[in-house]
Image (cartoon, grey):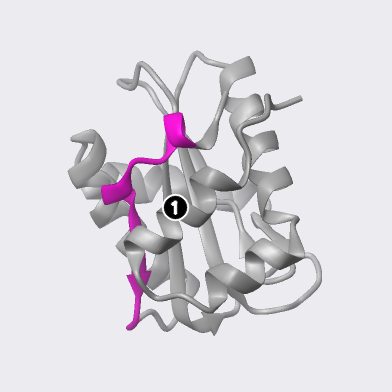
Amino acid sequence: MILSQLLKPRAVRVLTDVSSKKRLLQGVADVASGLIGLPAGEIFDALQDRESLGPTGVGHGVALPHARLPVLTEVHGAFFRLEKPIDFDAADRQPVDLVFTLFAPADTGVDHLKALALVSRTLRDQALRAKLRANDDAGTLHTLLTEHTTSEAA
């Protein structure tokens, strides 16, 4: 699995007006609705349900919210760089400004886990995080993410 399979250019955005975790998840749901063809409310509820199990802020200003949606047939991703970091209840208590969301079919296990591992491993790279934070062009962000690695997820 490679990031370019999960992340299409139109699924990368820079968000300038996000002020809270809830507003971020609403914005993510709105964007994802256009990408995967499901109602934004359904996507938002699935993201909120997952967050209620435990926050997906993984540290270093990165969050990996994800949800399983029954009508999907493959894993989809979306990336958001926030102009202003927000509190995301991250493990290291640092505000979040890099958000990679994943949406997977309800009945998939291995593909969803591989995708999470790939994204997590990619965003652990400090130099990549710095480059992502230094750019506000969606095309450049997509290129940075998809050209960073083509290795298989563990």
Q: Is residue 100 left or right of residue 42?
A: right
Question: How far from the left and from the top, in percent, is residue 51?
Answer: 57, 52
Indicate the position of residue 30 as horizontal and vertical percent values.
24, 56
* Mark 1 surroundings: few (<14), some (14-19) or many (≥20) residues within 10 A: few
Q: Which segment is the magenta one?
A: 4-17
At mark 1, the secondary structure is helix
Q: Residue at x 46, y 20 (%)?
A: 106
Q: Residue at x 33, y 83 (%)?
A: 17
Q: Quadrant of residue 83?
A: bottom left
Is residue 3 left or right of 16 when viewed as pictured? right
Q: Quadrant of the C terminus?
A: top right
Residue found 50% across the figure and 44% down from its top: 146
Please state, as top left, top right, bottom left or bottom right, where the N terminus lies in the image. Answer: top right
| Three-letter residue code for mark 1 | Thr
The image shows residue 96 at horizontal and vertical percentages of 60, 73
- Is residue 107 shown in magenta? no
Front residue of 39/79: it is 79
Residue 112: quarter of image: top right
Q: Nearer the viewer, residue 54 or 6?
A: 6
At x 66%, y 36%, the residue is 118
Task: Judge whether 126 appears above or below 38 on screen.
Answer: below
The residue wearing badge 1 is: 143
- Residue 49 at least partly seen: no
